[in-house]
Amino acid sequence: MKDREDELDADERDFLELARQRRRARRNRLRAGWIAIAVVLAVIAGLGTFLVYQGKVSERRDAEARSRAMAVLADQLERSDPGQAALVAMAAYEIAPTQEARNAVLRGYDRFKRAAWVLSGTEGKIVETAMSTDGTVTLVTTQLGRASLFVRGAGKSVTSTRLRLNEMAFRPMVSRDGRRIAYTSGAGALVWHDLDPEADSTAELLGPAHMIRADEFRARAEAQRYSSSPAHTADFSPDARRVVTVAADGRPRLWDLETGRHEELPSRLPAFESVWFGSDGDTLVAQRRDAGSSGDRYTFVAVDTGTGGVRELAADVATFYPSSGVYSAPAVSLSGDGGVLAWCRTEEDEDGSGKGVYRFVRVGDGRVLNRYGSDSYNCKGVSLNESGQRFAVYDGEWLLGDNRRGGEEKRAMGPKPANFGNRLLGDPARPVVTTWDETTVTGLSLRPVTGTDLNWVVSHPTLIDDGRIQVAQVGRRRGHSDLTAESLVLYDVVDDKATAEVKRPTAYAPTDPDPSQALAVNEAETLVADVVGRNRILIRRLPSLSQVAEITTLMPPVRKDGEAEPLSLFFAGGDELVTRSGSRIERWDAREAGGSLSPWTRVTSGSPRRTHRCTPRRRSPSTPASR
């Protein structure tokens, strides 16, 4: 019809126009409808997306708020329950990695990074601890007179329970096999329980309480109200059927736990301060203070419970301070089976200087099994394993020893213990020393060092790879001699191992280097500058530590005291190294070129520009020549 409209009359053309208008209107209405639908859908999608986003923002902010609240809780728990505080901090970080949670986790890591296990959660400050020979069962009493029991199971599981007592508890005891515990109650009784370490629940862990009432325990309870003593005044027999105690008058007594009666000992026995059972039920190891000696000196003897015979094991035993407290204690330790006594006293060398000498004596016959002379004048606490064959001594650094014939001492790496003279657990390859403070009982992991040398970081280390890798100059020390940086080491602080190590030239090493200016790493962490002489610097590639160049700077000036000023250096940007020798500054520029370094350029302030050619270390015959 479009090409034949001229054949239509006016009415027919009007009809066609009206039809076209109607069709256009209908099309416009459909288009408007679809547009409206699209707009509505877009609005719905936008609002939905916005609501979802806002929901996620709200969830994130809520998680961050809960994470910060838990981080604050972890900080509060740190004072009373550090172990629980560390767990709360990790939970806070898992909820949201806020800065507060991260700080709490790092505090916990810094405190327990060398711990094999941690026991905490007591009611009050810990004042006394007792432990089975294998370290699985621990009973502690606190300043408030509360008692807490910890049982370490297979793996890393720990079952803990607080003893709900109507009176105070002190003087805790744990049998050698960990199947019986005891304590003295504030009501004046010796209380003991059978223990099932393999129990599935805390309700089945402890058996019923058994009590022995006597005037001796009432006197001890009364004295405990006014002061506490570090003396070891009670101990289980090897079979845990009897308990030996020291009364207020120093007289030892044996108590039969089944009958509740005490066994008479020969009346001629002297007064003692502390007492333990030896390797059998007929031998006691007792401590008495030496009369007339200068300062606090002690004697330890073996006592035959049948005949009353007394045999000296150690004399003139020195004292030390086990912790930061004010009381001192004898420098002794008894092995877990009661068969070996370790003790220390100060003796003079041939040159007249004194040092602490440790002896390890077999209780059965008094034979000296081993002798160890420390580098320190003062005696410290010593830890023995169950059999007394191995020992550990801390004197600024850890030393592990073997009392068997042909045994030797070796150094070990580990943290300083909060309390000395405790149990040595684990095996020779992975030893663990127990220690305790006011809030925790901790097993410290020690790492034996091969040979008799111990690595020490000499310079200020530099961290790379987001703090995972430590670049440090490492030396070796024998005793208390001076340190020399013998190696350059890359140390992985996460995996706790060295990833690369090279020997450093020490023939011309400065005698007094500036430790804060001995190393420098460029921003890209591809090069490290190592000061190896008064005016010599080695440039090494990271992370291989292969040498790529050697720099000889101007000689540093000599101070008025006759000592040379230390050379300092830093990377200014890229591979540009700046060195300072006294008041003179030099700039060295290294540029990568086909796998080798370009020549170095030196500019000295206050003098004409001088260019020196310093040939890089050749890597292979195919290395491009320097320009």
Image: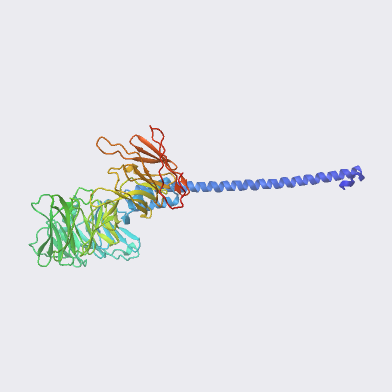
Q: Is residue 67 left or right of residue 290?
A: right
Q: Position of residue 366 (x, y in %)?
A: 13, 64
Q: Nearer the viewer, residue 506 or 190?
A: 506
| Residue 586 in the image: above or below residue 218 | above
Q: Quadrant of residue 574?
A: top left
Residue projecting furthest to the top? 606
Residue sitting at 36 percent across and 38 percent down?
A: 580
Q: Quadrant of residue 260?
A: bottom left
Residue sitting at 35 percent across and 65 percent down?
A: 200
Residue sitting at 32 percent across and 59 percent down?
A: 160
| Residue 480 in the image: above or below residue 252 | above
Q: Is residue 496 left or right of residue 26?
A: left
Q: Nearer the viewer, residue 153 or 319?
A: 319
Q: Position of residue 621 (x, y in %)?
A: 44, 52
Q: Nearer the viewer, residue 331 or 259?
A: 331
The mark total stands at: 0
Q: Nearer the viewer, residue 167 or 556?
A: 556
Q: Quadrant of residue 511?
A: top left
| Residue 159 in the image: above or below residue 588 | below
